[in-house]
Image (cartoon, rainbow, N blue to C red):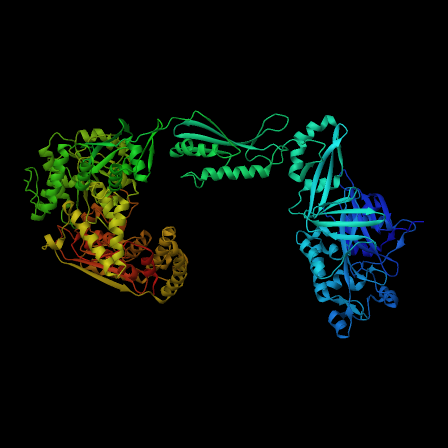
Amino acid sequence: MPAPPPRLDPVAVGDVVGSAAFRRAQGYQRAGMVRTWRWDADACVLTARVAGSGPQPYTCRVSFTVGTDGRYAYGSSTCSCPVRADCKHVAAVLLHVGAQPGAADAGKFDDGGGDGAPEGWRGRLAAVTGVSGARTADADEVAARGGGVLPVALRFRLDEAFGDLPTQLSVRPVVRGRTGWKVAPEASWEALATGLYAFADVRATPAPEVRRWFADLGSALADGGGFGRARQAWRPLAAGGRGLWALLAEASDLEIPLVAHGARDEVRLARVAEARLVVGAAGDGVRLDPVLAFDGADAPAGAALGAVGDTGLFAADTQDRRTVLRVGPTPRRLGDAARELVVVGRVDVPAADVAELFADHLPVLRRAVRVVSSGSVELPDPPRPVLVAEVGFVSPEHARLAWTFEYSPPDGAVRRVPLDGATSEPVRDPDAEAEIRDKAQAAVRGVAGFERFDLVARTELRGLDALDLAHAVLPALAATGDVRVAATDVPHYLHLDAAPRVVVSGAPSGDSDWLDLGISVTVAGKELPFTRLFTALARGDERLLLVDGSWLRLDQPVLGRLRDLITEATALSDRPGKARVSRYDAHLWGELEDLADVVEAAAAWRRALAGLRSLAAGGSAPEPAAVPDGVRAVLRPYQREAFEWLTFLWDHGLGGILADDMGLGKTVETLTFLAHARTQAPGSPPFVVVAPASVVGNWVDEAARFTPDLRVVAMPATARTLGTEVADLAAEADVVVTSYAVFRLEFDAFDALDWGGLILDEAQVAKNPRTRAHETARLLGAPFKLAITGTPLENNLMELWAVLAIVAPGLYPSMHRFKAETARVVDAAAADDDPQVVAAGNRALARLKRRIRPLVLRRTKEQVAPELPERTERVLRVPLTPDHRKVYDTHLQRERQRLLGLLEDFDANRVAIFRSLTTLRRLALDASLLDDAYAHVGSAKLDVVTDELTEIAAEGHRALVFSQFTSFLRRVEERCAAAGLPVVYLDGATRRRADVVRSFRDGDAPVFLISLKAGGVGLNLTEADYVYLLDPWWNPAAEAQAVDRTHRIGQTRNVVVTRLVAQDTIEEKVMALARRKAALFDAVLDDAAGTFARALAADDVRGLLDG
């Protein structure tokens, strides 16, 4: 009678799978989900089928061990469900089988790893007391009392296939007994790993190196299996991964036997195991037999075959009740197909299906394992993929390249597969494809210019790449094995190898400062496209490809010189497709004359160059000119000099900058010139004057006063608002005066007309090259352009370049070159004590002043108007109140920490940096400007200015009060009102500005509150003799403009200028920075040699935060 199945205590079942899985298992068991089960008493293995959520039941296998008391103990489990082991399905099987009549009682979960329980009285009492032994002993204790060395072996077990679980190998440690190898507590995985034993009377222990080996193996076999596998006695060999085989090979050196179940059974470890598929004849059909070889020797026919995970193979051959287990690692990882092929066994294919086998299945089998013939069947050669390069030329400058693989299988049907398609297609050979693809890519990368080419499914090639594709890439591919080139419509590329012939012709352009160049280059009678040639030369290309497929090399001497000239000229970047040379660059023109085979120069061009040389030689003393009779003004000597200078520029078609100090009469100087121009050319187009909105009316008034014969018309608003078009106004005028805003909005209308000249008043408005004001001023077509500004640079030399780019665009045609060769060199000298750096800065500054001298006229009041009343300037430092100081210092520390981090990338954080600086400046004025919660703190500066205004008003004086913050001006207005002081207020939002200004000039209000931005230009307010600047700014020119609203020609009283500075705040740092910036202005325009300064940069901001 067969032995009954084990009945495992439900508590032990719960210990194995956990409480959650155990509860589900109880439901499965009650619902009858365990469909079939089988108990193998000899192998101590329970197998079963359990229904799950899917259509197919799961297969479970549970292994037991037998203790010395004859009771079963749970060993290990496997399941085909996603959990794989110790799951609810295994628990359901254990509960179901345990409930069967006659089931034998089993012990609880084996705490010794399933290797048995304590014997004798200890075992019997353990169920009562829970104590597994009297005490424990470790390996060192056993050795100390003279214990011997315990031999330990690794036992292999063949777990036969059941259901969808394949045959697999499991292992466990065993010790030498009197009759053979046996299970013992001292040889459990846990005991071998820890050196701790459950019984104090252990007489022998394994050698330390043996324990270490078993500990490593046990750990490898338990990895990833969770708690259940760590407690299993039999552990699946497949869990060991690739590192398993090095451990097994080490066993021989440690004299650890590899044993099987029976005494006569044998385990043979091979160095290498390989699988192959043998194809042989079977009647009219063929037979497929998987064969495993271990160290080159085939396993006997009929052996049970299997895989050890994806790293090894085994074969178990049983003859005469003796089993030989062969096991070994594979040279490379086994894929899913190879593992399935090993266990599927022999396959017979009928004759009618052999063709399908060879066409569809054989390529896949060959990828899985080595396929050979037994000699009775001729196997078709595996189809070798061919990489096809399909090339289509859209034009000589545009090619499309597509890649596919082509297979020619035995059935004769050519199959085309995409380059990056699914490699699971039966016909594909991924290894061969990768080899060919790498080989083809290497061939392409061997062509110059294609070193980084990536072989992808589709590629677009343009320009020279298309030429090189036809000339070099396709031949290289054609010479590569396993690659076929399929090219259609390949153009005929013609190499032009004759010497180039250069012809230069020139004529004055619509822009008076440039000569339009007609440069043509012909090679072998073919004229090269100008834009394409010069763009290629500027890029440094070595070759040029034309649209018809002809091409030439550009590394020729004459073209090389032409490339150098293009580097100097910026015509291509300014007007693509048209080369231009500035009238100021005589050197470049001379180079072009030397280069060209034929030169056609314009007479007007030669006259313009002669005029420039005359100005450069004569400095600011051009030829005398008579003041027109219609001018109703007596010009001072310096004003007459300015008039004659303007006349000279206009006569020679040159632009300039009138940079006289503010208040010296630049407007009357310019009006006198305009009267002269209309007298000399009465039928010529009118001039257009662009000025700030606040001074448009002033131009009309001044013209009516000094040049009444000039027809001066104002355009203060857009044509839509006025109801009059620009053309209609210009038709009836000698001069049209408009604002920068209207000029920008109506630019198309202005640009559509002819103009005698463009005059920019307060031209610093257009100092930023990125603004529309600058752009429109540069674009307007006019033969003469004049910039009027007392501050052609306020912060840095790039502002001067921007103004020069409008009035004399050829002087420094490249902004980047000016920045690199002039601005940065001067800037570097300011920040460095190195004599060489300073000397380079001095040279750059001297060169700049020499070049701009003919075009810039600058005189100061001290030079030409010593009769002006005295101007007194004072700085009034105002200490903060204690409460104000506390608030300021708190925010200063916070903003300082934030700013120092932002300064690491000044350009990227520019907006945030200036926002923080503005916060500190507002705080220095009045804390309530930052937050109304600080209204109680008060402002000492507000108290001081109110007191001073009250005092000077009482003495009959009048004052202009400037601030950049309108919110603070409103506070001053409130305080003045409280003190009974009438005020006039002007800021950027004020409408009817002229009326506001007139109310102050004609009224009695002693105080005019003006925002610095709104009132810094275009105002003549000599009625005031006191000026208050409430908050310093690091742009000294802006402050100087504000002061000069009152200290100018016409002032009869001494002027007192007061700057209020909050003591020990950022305002003091701003004052220091402003002084340094003023030095830059003086260095460039006032002949102060060797003085340098820089634009506001990161180091400047750090300086503002110091202290």
Q: How far across and how far down the image is residue 320, in percent?
A: 85, 47
Rendered position, 518 above or below 920: above
Q: How far across and how far down the image is residue 674, in percent?
A: 13, 38
Residue farthest bottom in this picture = 145
Q: In this view, does 360 lie to the left or right of 1009?
A: right
Rendered position, 583 above or below 268: above
Q: How far across and how far down the image is residue 314, in percent?
A: 74, 47
**Which image quadrant for residue 461?**
top left
Rendered position, 60 above or below 1053: above
Mark count:
0
Specify whether residue 378 is in view: yes
Classify the position of the C terminus by image quarter: bottom left
Q: Residue at x 6, y 38 (%)?
A: 628
Q: Name the one closer to the observer, 571 or 1033.
A: 571
Q: Name the one closer to the observer, 236 or 665.
A: 236
Q: How far across and how far down the image is residue 1096, in percent?
A: 30, 54
**Which image quadrant for residue 782?**
top left
Q: Name the one closer to the observer, 620 or 394.
A: 394
Q: Is residue 342 left or right of residue 947?
A: right
Rendered position, 192 above or below 395: below
Specify whether residue 86 is in view: no
Residue farthest front in this picture = 375
Q: In this view, does 203 lie to the left or right of 873?
A: right
